[in-house]
Image (cartoon, rainbow, N blue to C red):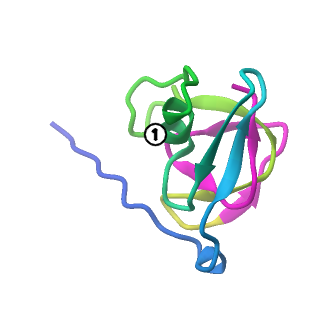
Amino acid sequence: MERFRLTPVRPPELDADPGCRVMFTRTGAESTADATTPLLVMGESAGVAMPYECRRGICFGCLTPLTYGRLGDLRTGEVHERTGRMIQTRVSAAAGPPALDA
């Protein structure tokens, strides 16, 4: 049996950021996020039916299109933009106001 644990890493440039708005464009929902909360959790807390399978980010069942915005990788702390691409919402957090096609 294998066990995995995701340890959130807050990108250093976001230390002063208390949170930002995450938009879910298809449903019109919004939520306030910080740099350590997975976008999957943010969507679910806003009432959006987010895709997932393992809830750990290892099966790629949590892929959702990123409309725009910056994301922080919770595994590495790296901040990147992947606008127009599929992102893993279980291992990604807001690093600026993102919008997801969900």
Q: Which kind of residue does numbered mark 1 sit on?
A: Gly
Which residue corresponds to mark 1?
57
Q: Is residue 80 magenta?
A: yes
Number of numbered labels in the structure image: 1
- For disc 1, the neighbor class at 10 Å (few under 14, some 14 to 19, many from 20) is many
- SS of the residue under disc 1: loop
For the point 73% across and 39% down, the residue is 23
Above or below 9: residue 66: above
Which residue is at the front of the view, 64 or 47? Answer: 47
Which residue is at the front of the view, 43 or 30? Answer: 30
In the rendered image, the quadrant that contains the C terminus is top right
In the rendered image, the quadrant that contains the N terminus is top left
For the point 66% across and 79% down, the residue is 13
Q: Is residue 75 magenta?
A: no
> Which of the 4 quarters of the picture holds residue 3?
top left
From the top left corner, tell me how far across and down residue 18 is, in percent: 60, 69
For the point 71% across and 21% down, the residue is 27
The residue range painted magenta reads 79-102
From the top left corner, tell me how far across and down residue 88 is, in percent: 58, 39
From the top left corner, tell me how far across and down residue 70 is, in percent: 75, 56
Which residue is at the front of the view, 39 or 45? Answer: 45
